[in-house]
Image: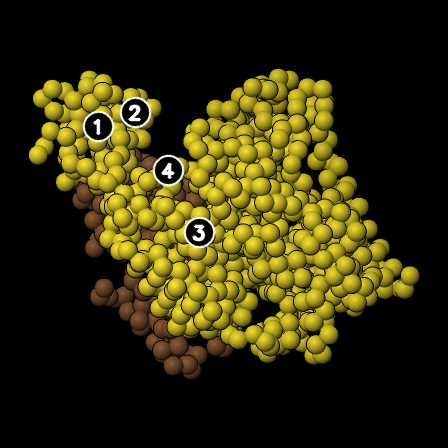
Chain colours: A yellow, B brown
Amino acid sequence: MSDSALVVEQNYEQLKNLALQKHGEIKEKPYVLVGTATCGRAAGALGVLDTFRNEIDNRQLDVNIIEVGCMGHCYAEPMVIIYKPGFPPLCYGSVDEGKAARLVTDFLIEDDPCFEFAMAALEPNDLFPTFGDYPRGVYEQKVILADCGLIDPENIDDYLACGGYGALAKALAMKPEEVIAEIKDAQLRGRGGAGFPTGIKWETCHDTPGPLKYVICNADEGDPGAFMDRALLESNPHQVLEGLVISACAVGASQGYLYVRAEYPLAITRLHTALEQARAKGLLGESILGSSFSFDIEIFKGSGAFVCGEETALIASIEGHAGIPTHRPPFPAVSGLRGKPTLIDNVKTLSYIPHIVQKGADWFKSIGTPNSPGTAVFALAGKVVGTGLVEVPMGTTLRTLIYDVGDGIKDGKTFKAVQIGGPSGGCLPESALDISIDFDSLREAGAMMGSGGIVVLNEDDCMVEVARFFLEFVQNESCGKCTFCRLGTKQMLDILTDITKGHGRPGDIELLLDLAEDIKTGSLCGLGKTAPNPVLTTINFFRHEYEAHINEGRCPALMCKDLITFHISAEKCSKLCDACVGSCPVEAVYTRPDMLKAIHLDKCVKCDNCLTTCRTLYDAVIKKSPPAAEEGVS
Amino acid sequence: MGLMEGELEIIRAEVEAVLEKYDLDREKLIPILQGVQVKLGYLPKEAMRQIAEALKVPEVDVYGVGTFYNQFRMNPPGKHQFKVCMGTACHMTGGRIIMESFERRLSISEGETTPDREFSLERVACVGCCALAPVVVVDETVEAKVRPTRVDGILLGFGLERAAPEKTAPDEGIDQGEEGREQ
């Protein structure tokens, strides 16, 4: 071992031992972890946190309270984990102020762990089942999400104590070529969506000569329906930083950027904290860990443009211009930011790097499929019970993902389709559920891995409206450079809007298909090339819905507002209940002389309020399509 | 929207203060615009002109960048901001209905500010809380699983009675609009 490698190792061991020592001290007494990522906060985690603080202060208990990130169980937010010596670490879901107070008095003071609120234990024990005992835990295999929600994202010692930055120390002792060879051998594919082999990109950047090179972490997660990058940055920022530093070390870059969406203020705050702590520990800055390698990272806040997820647009944005993609080649790895070789990787891709460097390419290849090794992270949302972030091996089927990991469809409804890959992806029907998910199989099915957003749709969702929604999104986000993307998507959107309003014409479907082909061929970047996917897949699998809209003026899912009317069923209405009348924001619901409720169709704004209110009572409010006349009014 | 009395001086001073923090380099244009927006809440024409002069770039470049990105506003925001999420999950669970409820109650359209500059209404592409859809960001607080009735509740919290769409004194304590707004 060379002298410098020895110094690196010594410095790292010192940091780690110090962290372990601090960590051990914390472990000696009870502590409470409260998940305060954005999703937890939205569900009320800050109120729960305050309750714990007040209760524990008032009773002068010696208990630490630590804010952590997101464990991925969004359906059960706010989540709390309590460690108390003598008990297995227990995780509690849907905690509110009341439950929090009970947990303090019953569990922390007395010894009753309140099993009635508990979700699962984190370690096998004789008292309570673990996450591994549920289907979700059986099918999940967590690599990059493993520590999320369990370690303090604002304390670098937590990450160090779990072996964090060990991969950096190892990489610093290796030759850059060796690191790149390992990544190439692991066949890691870029998790930003396209699935380009990461190792090849690194090699290109490494082989391009130049005194100044840059690395950029692409955290411009603009895909509506995906939030895994946010969760990773908020829950385990050091994992991403470590990956970025290793990538810089491998290609020989001296400056790095984190391009983060401005819509993620908490992620930006936690990253700032993480950067400061890493600098203070000598893991960033001049001669990292005592080696000859110097590197620092700057945060660049994106300003809200979906197209900036495209790497050349992202570079234009950092340079102070509008985010308009340019032609490739030259690829950024050859000539990128300020004309210098620039390596751009997604948050998830970088998060895998420390694990691959530590555990080796063979370990990585043992997970997943031969062409797409490793795990895939999905953001499960929509009409599925177990919403949240899940990490499964590549090759898992959509059926397993939705019915086992996601625990099936909400409210006993029927599955209709799954939208995967966001605006670049597509809608797949029931018949596609047995596809095993990887980069290639999804593309064959007409969808795309994209950034991994999965939205489950049920019988109440109109597929034409879904297609229209995505097209509206890309239409808004098109940068306007390519005519086909700029004007073609506009034409498609107009046609789809007409169809959802009942003004569709025969021949519209063929026209949409024509335009879709032209836009795919005539666009420069991924945004335009994939923009028609949602339309193409919905026409392919749900053509009958388009036809019902166009030919019959009927929305089969009862969703398109211009094609439905609201009515109250005389058989079901209780007559003596006024809930619907009170719920109407525009006073369209009224009581007839015979006490039956009815709706003035000319006043009704179709807000769904009466229907939702009545559903749990008498379920008497119904929707009709095509629009019907008001009962008793001619 | 016209400037109020004394507003021009405030704009000039704030822009000057932001410019002092950065190198006067074209690359710093976006951070400068972001900084100005944090201070003023939007990008007034006068501010863009001043930035263009300082960076020695044509005004049209500043305007081009400012209008390209969704984050930048060209109109003064309301004292309180409602951002309705229109991501996929929110859209499928009724985000549009929520937006329409706000529009109806505030008598403004998406992207507008009430004439008294109390409230503004915007759409955002996705705030990343898809599992809790539909969501609305009220100032800096994320409201989960919003129903049209909750819209009334939110507005009531700001002193807006359901029957009278006229505003009364806004609630205190919930206003974090000036400090935390880095969107």
Disc 1 to disc 3, C-alpha distance: 36 Å
Judging from the image, what secondary structure is the residue with disc 2 in? loop
As shown in the figure, which amino acid type bears the numbered disc 1?
Ile
Q: Amino acid at mark 2?
A: Asp
Read off the chain for label 3: A
Q: Residue B174's image quarter? A: top left
| Mark 4 Cα shell of 10 Å, populated few (<14), some (14-19), many (≥20) | some
Looking at the image, is mark 4 or mark 2 earlier in the sequence? 4
User: Residue A247: which numbered mark, if any?
Assistant: none
Circle 1 is placed at which residue position? Answer: A568
Relative to A500, residue B73 above or below: below
- Mark 3 / mark 2, whichever is N-terminal: 3
Secondary structure beneath dot 3 equals: helix
State the CA–CA distance, disc 1 to disc 2.
Answer: 9 Å
> How far separated are the C-alphas under marks 3 and 4?
19 Å
Mark 3 or 4, which is nearer the eye?
3
Q: Vertically, is A500 above or below A78? A: below
Residue B30: percent from left, percent from top: 46, 69
